[in-house]
Image (tube, rainbow, N blue to C red):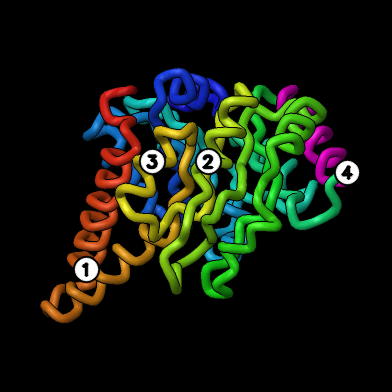
Amino acid sequence: MLVNLKEILQDAHRGKYAVGLFNTTDTDMLEAVISAAEELRAPVIIGTAEILLPAGELKLISPAILAAAKRASVPVVVHYDHGLTFARCMEALQLGFSGIMFDGSAGDYEQNIADTREIARIAHSFGAAVEGEIGHVGQADSDDQNAAQFYTKTEEALDFAARTGVDALAIAIGTAHGAYKSKPSLDLERLKEIRGALDLPLVLHGGSGLSDDDFRQAIACGISKVNIFTDLCLAGNRAMKEGLEMGLSYLDVRNHKVAQMCEEVKKKMTLFGCCGKA
């Protein structure tokens, strides 16, 4: 069933578990994620990010994601991740997305607040929830996840949440997007401080590549949503390589890929503690 982002994150926030956002660019990924969620009876967030649109245009992929969400036997949020432009966020809302993440974190702080507040106002009128971001989540291929000066500050998190009306907040505590070159170091004390001061679901971007212990600690300290994409891609890559080496047909390679991505999603859901919460 298609649900609002706020609904499932409030439950996760209160229950001290996390729900995974699994970005998808095609129906193979979509099938893997939905199958895992239904098997484990877990709520799930499925979406795509603005930077991924060249690999799966919104008008092409969104009808499939929305249809799968509506017929699923578990709660599914269809989420627009890392929206960078007003026009694309509005397009996602008009298509029927139930969650919008606007990312103005790379720009001016006051402009980020103004833009996020306006998108939240419009999204709420559509019945969708909004995630904002403050602080800088680095790029792992640049090895900049440890730029502590860009980590989220508690006082700014409080100010941002109060002035924008967001339903969830992505924070920077040492993760990075993509595959890590070196082991990330999470600032869990900062996370606990923000969680203690702000009664709002917190989001961890750049989750792929973290250790199982990193996930457990981050969720125990207050994370309610974790974004995954790279690990899903890596599982698919390995499966295709295996299938080709085994001499499988195109369709059998495809099915092997979906099965292996499904296993990766189930592994993450188990770590996040959301199994049986649907």
Q: Are marks 3 and 4 in contact (CB under 8 Å)?
A: no
Q: Tell me the residue at 79%/31% (across/down).
A: 159
Quadrant of residue 67 in the image? top left
Q: Amino acid at mark 2?
A: Glu
Q: Are marks 1 and 4 in contact (CB under 8 Å)?
A: no
In the picture, which quadrant includes the C terminus?
top left
Percent of width and height locating residue 212? 30, 49
Residue under label 2, please give it: 189
- Which of the two labelled residues, at mark 2 and mark 4, occupies the earlier sequence position? 4
Task: Assess whether residue 251 is covered by the magenta stretch.
Answer: no
Q: Which mark is residue 253?
A: 1
- Looking at the rendered structure, the secondary structure element under dot 2 is helix
Task: Give the distance between the C-alpha atoms of the residues marked 2 and 1, in whole angstroms.
Answer: 44 Å
Q: Which mark is residue 110?
A: 4
* Crowd rating for badge 2 (residues with CA inside 10 Å; few <14, some 14–19, many 20+): few
The one nearer the camera, 167 or 192, is: 192
